Amino acid sequence: LMESASFYELVSEQLQEPGAQVCVDLSGCDYLDSTFLGCLVKLHSAAQGSQPPGFRVFAPPDARQRLLRALHLDRLLVMAETLPATVGETVYVPFTVPNREQLAELVADAHRRLSQLGGPCAEQFARIADSVGGSKSQASPE
C-alpha cells in the first residue's frame, strides 16, 4: 500500500520513454494488496497499444496462481513467460510515503479500476473506492 504510489510514479515515468520496456518481477512476492494490484491494472491500461507490449509482468506459475488468478489478472495483464535479462545496474528507489489525501486518491483509483473489471469482488472494490474517495475519484482510462 505505502509503496504503490512511488512504484506507479517510477514505472509510468519509464513508460513515457519511446520504446520503453518494463517488466515487473513478482517472483519474490508472497502477497500483493488490492491497491498495488489496481496500480498494475492502471499501468497495463497506460501501456495499451504499444508494440511490443511496453508493460509486462513476470511471475512463476505458483506465484501467478497465488497473486493474480483470483481476480483474473493473469488473463488481463501481459505476462512474460520468462524473466527478461536485466539491463544496466540495479537501482534502489526510495519510496515516498504519500500524505493522507494522496493515499486516499490512490486507494480509491486502484479499487475503482478493480471494480470495473467485474468479477466476484467488483462490488466490494466499488464500495471501498466510494468510501475512501467518494465520487470525486473516477478512474480515467490513461
Image: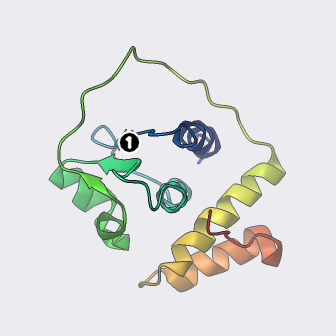
Location of residue 113 in the rendering, given as x and y in whole percent from the top left corner: 57, 71
Q: Quadrant of residue 66?
A: bottom left
Residue 140 picture location, percent across and down: 67, 69
Please identify the quadrant where the C terminus is shown: bottom right
Relative to the observer, which residue lies in front, 112 or 46? 46
Residue at left offset 58%, top offset 42%: 16
Secondary element type, mark 1: strand
Residue at the spot x=30%, y=37% of the render?
28
Position of 20 relative to 134 (above/below): above
Residue at numbered disc 1? 24
Residue placed most toward the observer, 23 or 33: 23
- Which residue is found at the position 62% from the left and 38% from the top? 6
Q: Nearer the viewer, residue 49 or 137?
A: 49
- Residue 81 appears left or right of 20: left
Residue at left 50%, top 20%? 92
Up/down of 133 relative to 93, above or below: below
Q: Residues within 10 Å of mark 1 (few under 14, many from 20)?
A: some
- Residue type at mark 1: give it: Val
Where is residue 73? Give x, y as percent. 36, 66
